[in-house]
Image (spheres, helix red, strand yellow):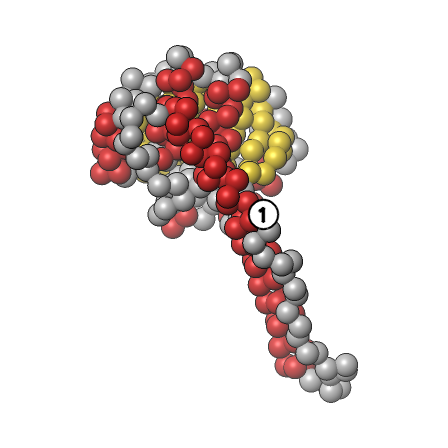
Amino acid sequence: MKLFKSATKPKVVVPAQSAPGNAETDKIIKSLQQQTKTLTAAITAIRKDLEHQPYVVAELVRRYHHLIDSDMPMPVLGANWAAIAPTVLFIVDEVMGRPGRRTMLECGSGASTLWTAAALRRCGAGHVTSVEHDKEYAEVTRQRLVDHGLDKWATVVDAPLVDTEVAGLGRQPWYDLSGLGDVADVDLLFIDGPPRPTASLARYPALPQLISRLGKGALVVLDDTNRKDERDIIKMWTAEGAFDRRVSHVKDVARSTVLQLD
């Protein structure tokens, strides 16, 4: 179903030739051209998202009826800091469609924790562990897990942000992992925290700090890669020699990027 016609690039009237030596005019023209390019790209992305929404909603409803045994609503996806539906659907499908993916780890708890736990329950095996810096939010997630009968399948770890030495970046606020225990051989790492205001490249430490816990062929899903910081993080992680293990780009899912370790 097509909801919008293709976005038409707004026209900017540009003089055929600037007055000689008018550097300020040239600067304004270049700025307008760049703003037009940025705006057009944003409109196109929004149009594509809206056109895809009916399919996403239908798939989400189908998964809900398959995974949830009660009429209790799940947390809204995409609200506030919650992961958006296509990303959560991808994670659920990885759990349901690949029997080997059973050990899941999250940076940041919330709606994705419940959906992942529900998928693991349906499969009858596995566990998702989520580290959360916000104590109140962690408690909300725990209560929702209990309400849905999913607390057996998920653990939310209180992990306040502490000053941490991060390879390749120096000192940076990052989760206190002392409560994570012996979680290892992780099959899928979903990174939806810490929040952007925490620091520049706030989510970069995820791989340097957690790569030793990731199993062979593990997937890494970084959320919010529509933002410059997260795109820069992807480039740093996938650079040749960044880690002892190769990190490869697999695909983009909505505003998230999926990577895989060798």
Q: Is residue 99 left or right of residue 199?
A: right
Residue name at image x 29 percent, y 17 percent: 152
Q: Is residue 157 visible?
A: no
Which quadrant of the figure contains the C terminus?
A: top right
- Characterize the local packing of mark 1: few (<14), some (14-19) or many (20 or more) Cα atoms within 10 angstroms: few
x and y percentages locating residue 151 in the rendered image: 28, 21
x and y percentages locating residue 31 in the rendered image: 61, 71
Residue 36's place in the image compared with 254, above or below, is: below
Q: Which residue is mark 1?
A: 1
The foreground one among 26 and 162 is 26
Mark 1 lies on a secondary structure that is loop
* Residue extending farthest bottom: 19
x and y percentages locating residue 104 in the rendered image: 43, 22
Q: Is residue 192 visible?
A: yes
Q: Is residue 9 left or right of residue 166?
A: right
Q: Is residue 129 left or right of residue 52?
A: left
* Residue extending farthest front: 1
Residue name at image x 45 percent, y 17 percent: 102
Give the quadrant of residue 36. Answer: bottom right
Residue name at image x 58 percent, y 27 percent: 260
Q: Is residue 142 left or right of residue 120?
A: left
- Amino acid bearing label 1: Met
Residue 193's place in the image compared with 227, above or below, is: above
x and y percentages locating residue 156 in the rendered image: 30, 27
The foreground one among 166 and 110 is 110
Residue name at image x 48 percent, y 34 percent: 59
Total marks placed: 1
